[in-house]
Amino acid sequence: MAAVRIVGKEIAEEIRQQLAQETEDLKKKGITPKMALILVGDAQDSALYVRTKAKAAESVGALGETHHLPEDATLEQLMALVDKLNRDDSVHGILVQCPLPHHLHQYEKQVMGAILPEKDVDAFHPVNIGNLLIGDKCYWGVTAYACIKILEKQGIDFKGKHAVVVGFSIEIGKPVTVMLFEKGCTVTLVSPDVDFAPYTRQADIVVTEVARPRAVTGDMLKPGAIVIDTGSNWVDGKSVGDVDYDSAAGVAGAITPVPGGVGPVRIIMLIYNLLIAAKDKAGA
């Protein structure tokens, strides 16, 4: 029996409708959620991501305000803009689109750390990451949170499940490991650079962050496993996941495709965090 194909667009639309209603309720109290997006340079992919995020904010009735700095902007100019937005009470969320131009690469952590934690809707500030680890209130990283939302929408009973996370970035692997553990899973975090098949074959839930196309095949999965593929690898001009979808779909119980799985949910979870920021600011 073929696996259930998890359609991220449908999940994202359900969440979007919920957020649109929450935005309307906030507007009745005189509060319009606003996200400031900072784009440095003219990289086409970064510009596309910023437009997509701004449109996502606008789709729920919030504001997505883009601040565009030139390619040769200095660190001082970028930090001054972040500081200005930190002090702007009308701005509830700040996002700096990465990667920054080459001459600013080494300062990315410094820039992220300059954003006020309560406006860090991308959840990269050390305070938000640290609070996640100790179980205090924080924003959850949007890609990792998208994985959890997708699993919740499948009606998963997390308690006692064995989850295997292949990959350990601060954006996905590490935070999703903590989130799954908090949900009651036994979690194994595995490097994508080792033979991870012995681990994934035991897993009820598999989250991949391998960064290699079709690296996870059906014979590496436990029958009935739920597979969340966060990969985005370019092959012959097309986006391909970490999972070989065709072979995995013959074994798994449910699986996210690439594209169309985690991606749409990741974007709307950014707006989810924005609404939390706006409600916290309003004391709502």
Image (cartoon, helix red, strand yellow):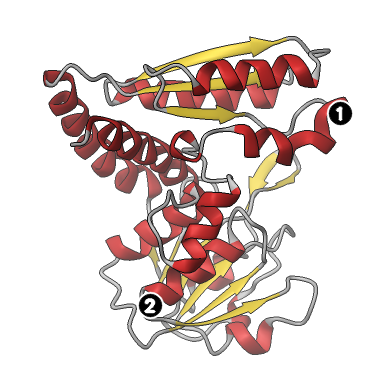
- SS under mark 1: helix
Q: Which kind of residue does numbered mark 1 sit on?
A: His
Q: Amino acid at mark 2?
A: Met
Crowd band around label 2 with a 10 angstrom C-alpha radius: few (<14), some (14–19), many (20+) = few
Along the line of sight, which residue is nearer the eye, 248 or 127?
127
Q: Earlier in the sequence, mark 1 or mark 2?
A: 2
Displayed quadrant of residue 164:
bottom right
The front one of 168 and 44 is 168
Residue depicted at x 44% and y 76%? 181
- Given residues 117 and 105, the one toward you in this image is 117
Q: Provide the residue designation for mark 1.
A: 102
Q: What x and y, as percent, mark residue 274?
A: 37, 34
The N terminus - image quarter = bottom left
Residue for point 69% across, 22% down: 79
Q: Which residue is mark 2?
A: 1
Q: Is residue 97 above or below residue 122?
A: above
